[in-house]
Amino acid sequence: SIPLGYFGGIGLASRNGILVKGAGFLDVITKINTLVSDKTGTLTKGVFKVQEVKTLLNPDEFIRLTASLESYSTHPVAKAVVAYAKEENLTAPVEVEEISGHGLKGKVGNKEVLAGNLKLMQKYGIDYPSELENIAETIVVVAIDAIYRGYLTIADEVKEDAAGTVRELKAMGIETIMLSGDKQAVVSAVADQLAIAKSYGDLLPEGKVKLVEELKEHGKKIAFVGDGINDAPVIALSDVGIAMGGLGSDAAIETADIVIQNDQPSKIVSAIKVGRITKGIVF
Ligand code: ADP
Ligand code: MG
């Protein structure tokens, strides 16, 4: 076959909904042996739904305070909480701090609200029932005026083409490793569904960076794919940084070498194939 040449390759990729920011990346992507992937919003839909609310307070008031604080954030978990609440009941929060990989702290009216994961509670020295450690789902734990007041459970689904992508990459000799800021129990359950052998949960953004650095030190050629603000540093660090361009954050998209416009992980396989065609590799 006649090699397309790199400009032809960029065009071919673009017609497949893949934005490649420089011809060299189509070459590098044919050489990767490891795909490191974020979980939420990348291999899963990132469209969370509130499943269950557990509180001893009036549930409407509990939801109102929690959703008011979460209205500050664009995190998929935050969007689920806001969608669950009645919009007319919300109060704009003030003095809000978004703590990456943890959740939020801020004031709603005269109340100091914390909403996030158990790491957030630990960070602020909030005592919570120890059985919360055993909940398998993603949870948003809430403290009001420094007292634990309840939690919501949240669920997300894997994308339709995620398992097929992992399988195809494996057939191409590429191992998939999943990293996430979400709880290990949730991460392990998703990894099982997708037949991903290596997965790491409970990671802060700097933890993702450290893991990718270690893999690089071990000689791995890495493509990283993610969607969040907190993925931008790892996207920058990888041999090929890939961002989800549909629902992905601006920071991830700007930092990436390759942007997948419709957020389908299978486009990673397509990008590798375009790279191979471009180089004239017959397969
Ligand atoms: P991932 O790496 O899977 O994309 P993130 O690093 O974005 O996940 O988030 C890690 C965890 O931090 C979430 O699973 C959630 O428990 C918690 N979290 C982050 N932001 C918020 C928020 N605004 N509200 C509640 N929890 C949050
Ligand atoms: Mg994410």
Image (cartoon, helix red, strand yellow):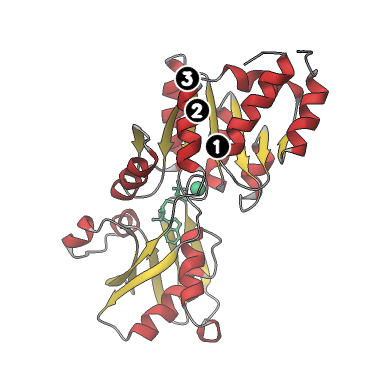
In x, y percent, where is residue 199? 36, 36
Cα gap from disc 1 to disc 2, whole angstroms = 14 Å
Q: Secondary structure at mark 1?
A: strand
Q: Callout 1 environment at 10 Å: few (<14), some (14 to 19), or many (20+)?
A: many
Q: Callout 2 environment at 10 Å: few (<14), some (14 to 19), or many (20+)?
A: some
Cα gap from disc 2 to disc 3, whole angstroms = 6 Å
| Residue hosting label 3 | 173
Residue drawn at point x = 72 percent, y = 13 percent: 280
In x, y percent, where is residue 101? 43, 50
On screen, residue 212 above or below 155 = above
Quadrant where the N terminus is found in the figure: top right
On screen, residue 31 above or below 226 = above
Disc with the residue nearer the chain's start (3 vs 1): 3
Q: Mark 2: is the Cβ under 8 angstroms from ligand 2?
A: no
Q: Secondary structure at mark 2?
A: helix
Q: In which quarter of the view is residue 211 placed?
A: top left
Q: Along the line of sight, which residue is nearer the eye, 241 or 2?
A: 2
Quadrant location of ligand 1? bottom left
On screen, residue 190 above or below 233 = below
Residue 41 placement, left or right of 103: right
Residue type, numbered disc 1:
Val
Question: From this viewpoint, which residue is outermost toward the left?
Answer: 130
Q: Secondary structure at mark 3?
A: loop
The label shown at residue 126 is none
Residue type, numbered disc 3:
Gly
| Residue hosting label 2 | 169
In x, y percent, where is residue 20? 72, 32
Is the Cβ of the residue at disc 2 closer than 8 Å to that at disc 3?
no
Residue drawn at point x = 52 percent, y = 50 percent: 41
Q: Along the line of sight, which residue is nearer the eye, 269 or 31?
A: 269
Residue 5 placement, left or right of 198: right
| Residue hosting label 1 | 225
